[in-house]
Amino acid sequence: MEAEQQVPRRRGRPPRQRENLMETRELLLRAGLEVLTEKGFSATGIEEILGRVGVPKGSFYHYFGSKEVFGLDLIERYGVFFARKLDRHLGNPSLSPLNRLRAFVADATEGMARHEFRRGCLIGNLGQEMGALPESFRARLKETFEDWQVRFAACLGEARKAGELAPEADAERFAAFFWIGWEGAVLRAKLERSAEPLEVFADFFFASLPTG
């Protein structure tokens, strides 16, 4: 008896049901980013996120295994999004390295102003809540900050090679200094609904860099 001939799978778009699941999951992640950049993880109810997307209550766990899994996915999504923003600015060949950093600061400040300083940094927000969050968040948040810091340090290293910074300038330490201070400035800007904390920190950061 001849073996039955297998029908090859069709390539192309996924089945409609799977496609709908992927689209809804994406909408939930976007809504989560919007809410959590304004509010804390602990203070945000799943119902609020579901309501923004129009997904029935009780359907959340159809897309994510738990709120913890949802939070970890949000950290990853935000980290990638922000890394791309950094790369756009820090890799801009039309500007000198230090002016690339200034362009990033200006863009981030404008972004907060556009949302009336209601939204901050998701990674910074979660870092402040760490005592009440799942321990699995700690390593993911730390890795995200370190990734951004490495990108900043690379640009500062380019500035050193270009003669904008003194040869002895420690790019890694200044990159760490920037992110430690910048996250505090973002928190203060959100609190005061003002760009002034961001501008004050940026002015002192650039003034502290030893020039070539």
Image (tube, rainbow, N blue to C red):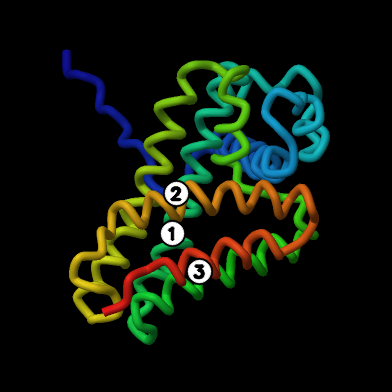
- The residue tagged 3 is 104
Question: What residue is drawn where x is 60% and y is 42%?
Answer: 122
Quarter of the picture containing the N terminus is top left
- Residue closest to the eye, 5 or 54: 54
Position of residue 118 relative to residue 22, above or below, is: below
How far apart are labels 2 and 3 at the CA level?
Answer: 16 Å
Q: Farthest residue toward the top?
A: 1
Question: What residue is drawn where x is 48% and y is 47%?
Answer: 180
Left/right of residue 97 with respect to residue 126 in the rendered view: left
How far apart are labels 1 and 2 at the CA level?
Answer: 6 Å
Instruction: Tell me, for residue 84, which label it has, or none.
Output: 1
- Element at badge 2? helix
Question: In the rendered structure, which amino acid carries the disc numbered 2?
Answer: Val
- Element at badge 3? helix
N-terminal-most mark, 3 or 1: 1
Position of residue 105 relative to residue 178, above or below, is: below
Q: Quadrant of residue 32?
A: top right
Q: Are marks 2 and 3 in contact (CB under 8 Å)?
A: no
N-terminal-most mark, 2 or 3: 2
Q: Quadrant of residue 100?
A: bottom left
The answer to whether residue 212 is seen in the rendering is yes
- Residue closest to the eye, 86 or 31: 86
Question: In the rendered structure, which amino acid carries the disc numbered 3?
Answer: Phe
- The residue tagged 2 is 80
**Mark 2 or 3: the one toward you:** 3
- Element at badge 1? helix
**Mark 3 or 1: the one toward you:** 3
Q: Quadrant of residue 16?
A: top right
Label 1 Cα crowd, 10 Å radius (few <14 / some 14-19 / many 20+): few
Q: Are marks 1 and 2 in contact (CB under 8 Å)?
A: yes
